[in-house]
Image (cartoon, rainbow, N blue to C red):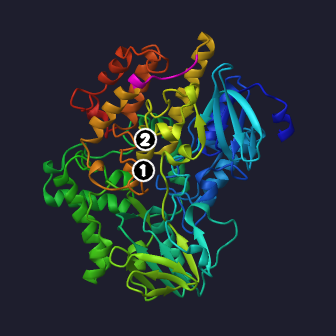
Amino acid sequence: MSNEEHETTPQIDVIVVGAGFSGLYAVYRARKAGFSVLGLEVGSDVGGVWFWNKYPGARCDVESLEYSYSFDEEIQKEWVWTERFASQPELQRYLSFVADKLDLRRSFEFERRVVSTIWDEVAQRWTVTDDQGIQRTAKYLIMATGILSAPKPHGITGLEDFNGEVFHTATWPDYDVDFTGKRVAVIGTGSSAVQAIPLIAEGADRLYVLQRTPSFSLPAQNRALRQDEIAAFEAKRHEVRARARYKPGGIDFVTTGQPVENFSPEERDALYEEVWQEGAPFKFQSTFSDLRTSAQANKTAMDFVANKIRETITDPVLAEKLTPTYPISARRLCLDTNYYATYLRENVELVDVKERPIKRAVAQGLELSDGSVLDVEAVVLATGFDAITGALRRINIVGTHGRVLADYWADAPHNFVGLLVAGFPNLFTVTGPSSPGALSNMVVSIEQHIDLIFTTLEMAQRDGVVVETTEAAQDAWARHGELLANRTLFVTTDSWYVGANVPGKPRVFLPYAGGVGNYRRICDGLVENGFAGFHADDDLSGVNAAIDAVFDAEGKSKFAHTATTK
């Protein structure tokens, strides 16, 4: 569809912002429901995070057989994954395949950055403006902007004076970047860096890794998928998908479902070793039921990984620098191939920027606080994201009575179930703050959110109502989320989960800690209770009833016995 056609078609039912997993499925559901729909995407093609993150070694940390759509039978049968953990190129090809299979590109305009969305209280429509000044209006607005799509400012003074090349893992160029024989600095040791560093080190003449906080990382044990594995999964696919929707992380695996104390140290470490050799980060941090709630239990997992690091890194000083001291899984648990072994290479040097902070960039490299200069030809910024809320806050979203979302969220991201925001009618934030997306198999969470959105829109169309939550419903959801978060170790550590990586960002635990299955049960209860919380009604009985059906007053799930077992 041409730009001219969109400009002369003012009555759009639904505008979707983003063309990743969320945006593609939202456009599909909108068309299937009979809505006119337009998708706007800043990139030149579909893919979302997998369009932008082309850095060396980029791959998913959920097994590809489950990190994929479940809504279309033909897509599931026709697409064949090649690796256990799919790489960025394969994920990009997959999303392109889906777009072609369902003819989704015709509903999108690419290279369109949305800069403003303003609610017209008289017309009850959203006016959406892109970076080319083109305006369109729609009744419903679905923000499928992603939770890791807004790179945070690097904060390095003078980088514009650097004579070499600068790359960011989140906006990697389309061309092949060749580091062969070059002196390179990688800033950051989060998930992206952990994947990229081993590959950059293979070709670089010298690699400096500038680390502020080490990451826990597990070996991916990645490999090509065998035909018999694919066939076995296909034979049980429907059962796997159904179970995953009610598992805490949206992934179908079996763990003990018991606390650490029920096992001897030998039994405990044997179970850790089994998962370590399997290569399954989500499963590792769920090996025992209390790893996310008990510091004592978590310490057993920390010690196990610390011993693994020391087995590889025999230099005790270096091993200590690479070993985190915060609870495992309190920050993003990484998945790698030969990450720790990379530090054994003679051309690799770890620079602790807590001891020697980066003072500024200069023409020949990076000057540290002690006056030394890292003489490099390329700098790779693996400095992370303004996660979960960043992409939304960067758009001028204005609701009723001139309420600006960025201002409204200045102290905390007030919302209801991660999907609705009071004062912003008919606007939906897919896997937004206080939903479980960041702690889950994102595709499972995305499908659940999009399905819930269109169940809601069909109700709104039928009943002729505007979809809008209330501050009372938001407060109830925030209290519930805070109760659950405070039972975990997530809130004990600075991380992007709590916004601590972005200066000035309010410190609030951003995801929902209750798990994918329990969250789904609550949402289903809200719908059954007359779409409680989805309309301008301060009666909280339906909201409270939906929560109380799943959790007790102490924040313990009434379905805990089914959370980690088949």
Can you give x and y, in whole percent of width and height, for residue 524 in the image? 43, 23
Is 416 a magenta residue?
no
Q: Residues within 10 Å of mark 2 (few under 14, many from 20)?
A: many
Of the numbered discs in the image, which one, if any, rests on residue 250?
2
The residues colored magenta run 466-473
Amino acid at the residue labelled 2: Gly
303 vs 426, left or right, is left
Label 2: element kind: loop
Tell me if residue 166 comes above or below residue 10 in the rendering. below
Tell me the residue at 26%/69% (across/down): 306
Query: What residue do we see at 20% from left, 57% from top?
Result: 268
Disc count in the image? 2
Q: Nearer the viewer, residue 396 or 98?
A: 396
Q: Position of residue 368 (x, y in %)?
A: 42, 81
Amino acid on which the number 1 mark rests in the picture:
Lys
Sequence order check, earlier mark of 2 and 1: 2
